């Protein structure tokens, strides 16, 4: 599993690449909120592109979990 960051709007958001039915990019809920307006539209084309690359947003505390825990959480969320 690879740990990385996604840079957007001058901030760095934690992300991880995990193997759940293929390699999937996971990031945090706060990034999801940052990408959207209050009306639910993307704030920019860059925001749309980032959102399309992220498979699932998880609570910030979950992104730092061990790989097994994170993979299990993602599987439960997509089931």
Image (tube, grey):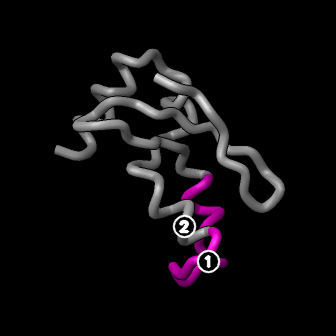
User: Which quarter of the figure has residue 25?
Assistant: top left
Q: Are marks 1 and 2 in contact (CB under 8 Å)?
A: yes
Residue ID at (48%, 20%): 65
Q: Position of residue 1 (x, y in %)?
A: 46, 22
Q: Tell me if residue 35 is in the magenta stretch.
A: yes
In this picture, residue 47 sits left or right of residue 56: right
Residue ID at (72%, 57%): 8
Graded by Cα atoms within 10 Å as few (under 14), some (14 to 19) or many (20 or more), the crowding at tag 2 reads few
Q: Is residue 68 above or below residue 5?
A: above
Numbered disc 1: secondary structure: helix
In this picture, residue 56 sits left or right of residue 2: left
Q: Tell me if residue 12 is in the magenta stretch.
A: no
Q: Is residue 40 above or below residue 50?
A: below
Q: Is residue 46 above or below residue 53?
A: below
Q: Position of residue 67 (x, y in %)?
A: 41, 18
Graded by Cα atoms within 10 Å as few (under 14), some (14 to 19) or many (20 or more), the crowding at tag 1 reads few
The CA span between labels 1 and 2 is 6 Å
Q: Position of residue 33 (x, y in %)?
A: 59, 62
Q: Position of residue 73 (x, y in %)?
A: 32, 31
Residue ID at (72%, 50%): 7
Residue bounds of the magenta highlight: 31-46
Residue at the disc numbered 1: 45
What's the mark number on residue 31?
none
Residue at the disc numbered 2: 49
In this picture, residue 11 sits left or right of residue 40: right
Numbered disc 2: secondary structure: helix
How many marks overall? 2
Residue ID at (55%, 44%): 28
Query: Which corner quadrant holds the C terminus?
Result: top left
In this picture, residue 53 sits left or right of residue 47: left
């Amino acid at each position: 599993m690879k740990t990385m960051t996604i840079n957007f709007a001058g901030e760095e958001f934690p992300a991880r690449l995990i193997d759940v039915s293929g390699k999937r990019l996971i990031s945090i809920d706060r990034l999801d909120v940052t990408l959207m307006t209050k009306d639910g539209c993307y704030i920019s084309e860059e925001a749309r592109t980032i959102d399309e690359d992220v498979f699932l947003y998880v609570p910030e505390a979950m992104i730092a979990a061990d790989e097994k825990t994170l993979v299990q959480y993602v599987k439960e969320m997509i089931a």
